[in-house]
Amino acid sequence: HYGQGGIVSSNVAPASYTTSVLKNRLLAAAFAGAEYIAPVEIFDPETSNVLMTYLLLHDLKQQRRQRRANSSNSSSLLNEAERRPDLADHPLSLFATTPVHNGIWRCGFQIRSLLELVLIYYFMDQYRPHLLTTTTAA
């Protein structure tokens, strides 16, 4: 348990082109339209798997270092909030230490408006040839 000094690895996987996500047509369209918004990038599942494995190993290694440091002081294992005072404000701050945000945090849009924008880009790109032939024929 985290509050009692146990090991916690709590990382959120990045947006990835997984089969389950691509079954949803709206999400598939949003992911395809994300290529138009720099610096947003949707990861391949293999990349996400490797990244999440490294983050887990990082968390375990950090925990071992902390245990070694504490055993030399013969004090109890410090939890993340005690080692990092900036995380003590809110429990969800734990997720801010190793974020994988696909570039969304560096983008000039809020996530809600970004979703609408990438969908518009995607559908405009998909139907542009049809729209151009319709308007030139008229």
Image: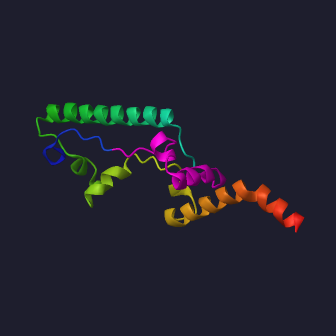
Residue 55, by quadrant, is top left
Tell which of 130 and 41 is nearer to you.
Answer: 130
Q: Position of residue 106 (x, y in %)?
A: 54, 56
Count the marks: how many? 0
Residue visible at 21% across and 30% down in the picture: 68
Residue visible at 82% across and 63% down in the picture: 134
Residue 28 shows up from this direction: yes
Above/below status of 100 relative to 49: below
Residue visible at 61% across and 63% down in the picture: 117
Residue visible at 76% across and 58% down in the picture: 128
112 within the magenta span: no
Tell which of 82 and 60 is nearer to you.
Answer: 60
Q: Which residues are magenta?
A: 11-39
31 within the magenta span: yes
Horizontally, residue 11 falls left or right of residue 47, namely left
Tell which of 49 and 119 is nearer to you.
Answer: 119
Q: Position of residue 61 (x, y in %)?
A: 30, 31
Q: Residue furthest right?
A: 137
Horizontally, residue 69 falls left or right of residue 118, namely left
